[in-house]
Image (cartoon, grey):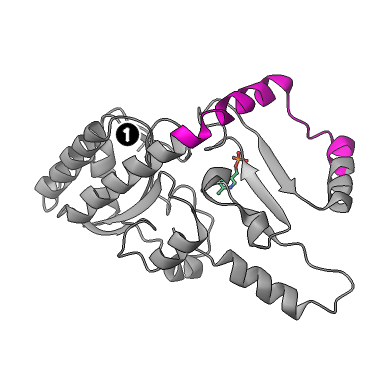
Amino acid sequence: MKLIDIQAVCTRIKSITSDWTEKPIIVVDNTVMSSYFQRPLSLGADVVMHSLSKYMNGHSDVLMGALILSDEELYRKLNFFQMAVGVTSSPFDCYLVLRGLKTLHVRMREHEKNSLEVARFLEQHPGCVKVNHPGLPSHPHYELGKRQMDGYSGLLSFYIKGKLDDVKRFISKLKIIAFAASLGGYESVCEIPMTSSQRHTPVGCMESWEITPSLVRLSVGLEDVKDLKRDLGQALDYMLSVQSSTEPVADSKNSEL
Ligand SMILES: Cc1ncc(COP(=O)(O)O)c(C=O)c1O
């Protein structure tokens, strides 16, 4: 959930490589923001990458990606590579993404509204130590976010008051929010980065990136936010109530735990 000043990085790279004959290609993965909230080409990037499987499609029913660029020569090279290797998308997946894109603006505004409300709720909850959401004034890159983006997605992370077992207890009690590593869909999902999406990160990096056993990532979906807050609240309350006991991790809908 840390932000990078794209314009500053691009300006710096371009200034130190201005006399190189082979220029570096600056690529920004814009998956988390979607093209509705952030447009890196206008901030100096050469290529924008999207996992269209996430917000751009938004319905968790497609696996697809895209590269967006404004350089004709680079486009031709990539297009040749795509045809030669055969990594083209199926017509049906293209249809689904095009269909999803028609509601991107409405979905993103709703993801933003819901995630901000959930973030504020978590920030107040005694079971939560810290919430990472760039739309919270407490976020270290809050000012950059306001300058660089037009809004916030549904993604946030938070540190639970406790250890990995407490996190597992908390997740096992969630009724609406599923335990899954994806993001950007209509439905809310959460995961434990240390054991899931970031499990291959070297230990040293985990420490410096503050990926601890108590960190939870949450992709806030389009459900009624009252239901989401109630779900998170009851699971956190349960976790706090059994924290000092030796109760085993309970079984539930999130049984993969
Ligand atoms: C930020 C980001 N970029 C790219 C990807 C890759 O997406 P896909 O699984 O659709 O290839 C992911 C997947 O989680 C992601 O989170």
Instruction: Find residue 133 and report its horizontal and vertical position in percent.
Output: 36, 55
- In the rendered structure, does residue 95 fall within the stretch colored magenta? yes
Please indicate, yes or no, whether residue 215 appears anywhere in the rendered image.
no
> On the image, which quarter does residue 250 sit in?
top left
Q: How many marks?
A: 1
Q: Quadrant of the C terminus?
A: top left
Q: Is residue 191 above or below residue 186?
A: below
Please indicate, yes or no, whether residue 57 appears anywhere in the rendered image.
yes
Instruction: Find residue 75 and report its horizontal and vertical position in percent.
Output: 84, 47
Instruction: Find residue 127 and report its horizontal and vertical position in percent.
Output: 18, 53
Q: Along the line of sight, which residue is nearer the eye, 13 or 172?
A: 13
Region rendered in magenta: 81-106
At 66% from the left edge and 21% from the top edge, which residue is drawn? 95
In the visual, does 255 lie left or right of 75? left
> On the image, which quarter does residue 82 sit in?
top right
Q: Is residue 151 above or below residue 228?
A: below
At 50% from the left edge and 68% from the top edge, which residue is drawn? 205
Instruction: Provide the residue designation for mark 1.
Output: 177
Outermost residue toward the top in this view: 92
Instruction: Determine whether the beta carbon of the residue marked 1 sits less than 8 angstroms from the nearest atom of ligand 1.
Output: no
For ligand 1, give the image quadrant: top right
At 62% from the left edge and 71% from the top edge, which residue is drawn? 9
Q: Along the line of sight, which residue is nearer the eye, 36 or 55?
A: 36
Instruction: Find residue 31 and report its horizontal and vertical position in percent.
Output: 57, 46
Secondary structure found at label 1: loop
- In the rendered structure, does residue 144 fall within the stretch colored magenta? no
Q: Quadrant of the N terminus?
A: bottom left
At 44% from the left edge and 46% from the top edge, which residue is drawn? 153
Q: Along the line of sight, which residue is nearer the eye, 205 or 115?
A: 115
Report the amino acid beneath label 1.
Ile
In the visual, does 61 lie left or right of 84? left
